[in-house]
Image: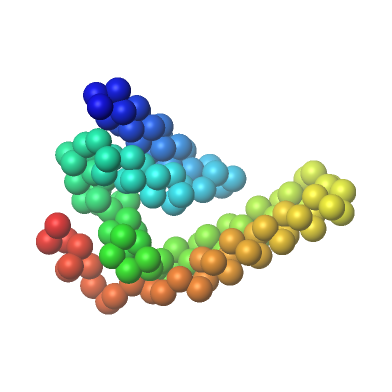
Amino acid sequence: MRVMRACNFALGGTMLSLAAAGAVLPVLPSTPFLLAAAWFFSRCSPRAEHWLLNHPVFGEPLRNWRRERAVAPRAKALAVGMMGASYIILLITASPDWPLACGTAIFLVLVGTFILTRPAPADNDQAGAAR
């Protein structure tokens, strides 16, 4: 059991590091890594999970996702905009063959559709702040 707890903590830390890198690198998403970090920490360290869920930057989006499976409109716009910009950069800089360009476009449209179809969170975060 101690080994699994240590593994979960190490994986949570790795995911959190990747999320922090994704916050500054345009090609690396941060949200999936944050969600994974919260999941790993919930299985091994209530203290680390609490810290992450109450973090001034990362906490609110995580609480919104856990509570309502919701994504803020600003985050949706930013995510879809960055995907579009990344695709344009790919086309300009890499000049990919058409199968790669089409496959990438299809993937980004599917992910963008998923993001855009998530509900917006409730007006305030008072329910999550009490945790």
For the N terminus, the quadrant is top left
The colour scheme used to paint the residues is: rainbow
Q: Where does residue 28 sit, x and y in percent of width and height?
A: 54, 44
Q: Where does residue 68 sit, x and y in percent of width and height?
A: 32, 68
Total numbered circles: 0
Residue 88: which quarter of the image? Answer: bottom right
Q: Residue furthest top?
A: 3
Residue under the image location 51 percent in, 62 percent down: 78
Q: Where does residue 57 sit, x and y in percent of width and height?
A: 31, 51
Q: Where does residue 16 sit, x and y in percent of width and height?
A: 38, 38
Residue under the image location 23 percent in, 72 percent down: 124
Q: Residue furthest front?
A: 1
121 lies left or right of 91: left
Residue under the image location 45 percent in, 37 percent down: 18
Q: Is residue 88 above or below residue 21?
A: below
45 lies left or right of 18: left
96 lies left or right of 72: right
Using the rendered image of the protein, determine whether residue 126 is visible from the camera's viewpoint: yes
Residue under the image location 14 percent in, 57 percent down: 131
Q: Residue furthest left?
A: 130
Using the rendered image of the protein, determine whether residue 24 is visible from the camera's viewpoint: no
45, 3: nearer the viewer: 3
